[in-house]
Amino acid sequence: MLPLVGLAVGIIAGLVFNIPIPAAWSKYLGIAVLAALDTAIGGLRASLEMKFNEKLFFTGFFSNTLMAVFIVFMGDRLGIDLLYLAAVVAFGVRLFQNLALVRRHYFQKRHWE
């Protein structure tokens, strides 16, 4: 329940404060949000499987986000936009896999499957 409250507070704060993001940072923010979402959904999955570990979650959250931003930064510096695309695909695939496992868990819990 606490993660959902945190997510709701974050969304409301983002809507209320309306902080402008420079266009040059949009790729970095987008990949950081994608990596953070991947970690959050992975944490939800681990929690449902009774394998959640706070230390792993927090270190994964920050290391995944920073690594994703670093990959995009390196791609920008080297002039290789494919690194950005590679990061988006990698985190996108993981996000959808974790989301599918979370959905499957709920279906099995309710005997809908």
Image (cartoon, rainbow, N blue to C red):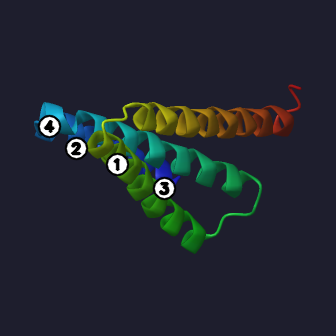
Residue at numbered disc 2: 13
Could you give the CA–CA distance between mark 4 and mark 1, rounded to whole angstroms? 20 Å
Q: Looking at the picture, which amino acid does disc 2 mark? A: Ala
The mark nearer the N terminus, 3 or 1, is 3
Q: Looking at the picture, which amino acid does disc 4 mark? A: Ile
Q: Nearer the viewer, mark 3 or mark 1?
A: 1
Q: Where does residue 30 sit, x and y in percent of width and height?
A: 34, 36
Residue at numbered disc 3: 64
User: Mark 1 Cα within 10 Å, few/some/many (few <14, many 20+)?
Assistant: some
Can residue 68 be seen? yes
Frontmost residue, 63 versus 102: 63
Frontmost residue, 91 versus 84: 84
Residue at left offset 54%, top offset 44%: 38
Frontmost residue, 78 versus 36: 78
Frontmost residue, 92 versus 13: 92
Q: Nearer the viewer, mark 4 or mark 2?
A: 4
Can residue 9 be seen? no
Element type at mark 3: helix
Could you give the CA–CA distance between mark 2 and mark 3, rounded to whole angstroms? 23 Å
Residue at numbered disc 1: 74
User: Mark 3 Cα within 10 Å, few/some/many (few <14, many 20+)?
Assistant: some
Residue at left offset 53%, top offset 52%: 1
The mark nearer the N terminus, 4 or 1, is 4
The mark nearer the N terminus, 2 or 3, is 2
Residue at numbered disc 4: 21
Element type at mark 2: helix
The mark nearer the N terminus, 4 or 2, is 2
Element type at mark 4: loop
